[in-house]
Amino acid sequence: MPRSERHLANTQSPAHCDVDEAIAACRLRGAQMTPLRQAVLSALWSADRPLGAYDLRDRLAEECGRQIAAPSIYRTLDFLCEQGVAARIESLNAYVACVHSDHDHACVFLVCESCGDAVEIENQQVEQLINEDAKRLGFVVKHRVLELSGFCAPCQETS
Amino acid sequence: MPRSERHLANTQSPAHCDVDEAIAACRLRGAQMTPLRQAVLSALWSADRPLGAYDLRDRLAEECGRQIAAPSIYRTLDFLCEQGVAARIESLNAYVACVHSDHDHACVFLVCESCGDAVEIENQQVEQLINEDAKRLGFVVKHRVLELSGFCAPCQETS
DNA sequence: CATCAAACGCAACAATATATCATCGGTGCA
DNA sequence: TGCACCGATGATATATTGTTGCGTTTGATG
Ligand SMILES: [Zn+2]
Ligand SMILES: [Zn+2]
Ligand SMILES: [Zn+2]
Ligand SMILES: [Zn+2]
């Protein structure tokens, strides 16, 4: 199931957006949504799992007919992550479209070791607890990496 | 301040161990604590920041007089992480000695973007909340990646 | 149109991680 | 003793991921 339909099955997070909304939101913030940036974001939305930078390059190559160089891919991904419409999953060296890009939040990913898919959830209580810890230590948080790896429900049945 | 003295300054986590205790604990579990494994773990304990696999290789080279190949380093680090006496920080591609290896827990790291150091804390409430989320979705958690990047207290004063 | 900054292309490179096979040393056993 | 076995390590090559530097193009703006 591609990311664009995934929210139908996710009971955790009521607020969602789609790729067009994400693009519109970036434009509203004054960001340049170039063809490449839109193409990369679309590719992430239509993927059924997190994509590495080089996966993305190959997928775009098929669509565009030409090879886009690695630096362009990385720059584009950096941009999309800064805009909050995509996110990097550190434990996979891969990227996904954020399904909650209509509001500020810390993405939490459940990454299945069997099927490779990553589901995004949100938990404001966790965010708050972590912020309190950081504050107590005088640590100013700029970015949060919250990833759980394991086995998703469908993959457990088949084992 | 190397990791081996760090606990004196950490008000968060009362329970701590040192490198010798960690080695002893592995032995009790029946794990083979070879010279290489002990050397790598000691290097992590005496480091004042997370070390990449190749950093470790270079440090060990100075001590041992010979180059240890990358695969050996990675195998050793995998072993130490499985034993719970070290941990990988995904957002840095680097490794640290775990300061709470005397009991099971999810490591939480506060990673400073300025000085590069990572302080480990523990938060059982966060662990529990995350486990509940996972359970609700039928997801079986095998591993948790909880990392906050930002700026530590000392580094804020100097900016 | 002229100007300027941001985005992009391109080539080379660096850093991180893995695959594969050979070797070594202890353990158990004929 | 001689030998098969197994886990740990060594060694080489290679794969994957990410970056730097620099020149060119693009597009917004006046
Ligand atoms: Zn998100
Ligand atoms: Zn799965
Ligand atoms: Zn720990
Ligand atoms: Zn710092």
Image: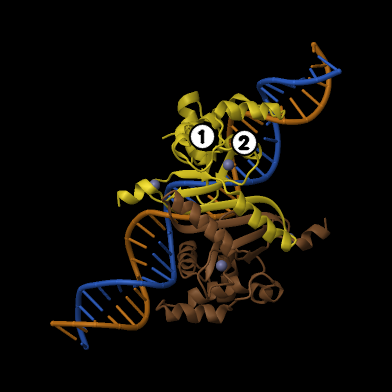
Chain colours: A yellow, B brown, C orange, D blue
Neighbourhood count class around disc 1 (C-alpha, 10 Å): few under 14, some 14–19, many 20 upward: many
Q: Is mark 2 within 8 Å of ligand 1?
A: no
Q: Is residue B10 above or below residue A79?
A: below
For image coordinates 30% across by 49% down, the residue present is A158
Q: Secondary structure at mark 2?
A: helix
Which quadrant does the N terminus of chain A fall into?
Answer: top left
Q: Are marks 1 and 2 in contact (CB under 8 Å)?
A: yes
Q: Quadrant of ligand 3?
A: bottom right
Secondary structure at numbered mark 1: helix
Residue shown at 55%/66% (left/top)? B57
The residue carrying mark 1 is A44
| Dot 2 crowding, Cα within 10 Å, few <14, some 14–19, many 20+ | many
Q: Which residue type does callout 1 highlight?
A: Leu
Where residue B62 sits: x, y (%)? Answer: 60, 72
Is the C-beta of the residue carrying label 1 under 8 Å from the nearest atom of ligand 1? no
Q: Badge 1 sits on which subunit?
A: A
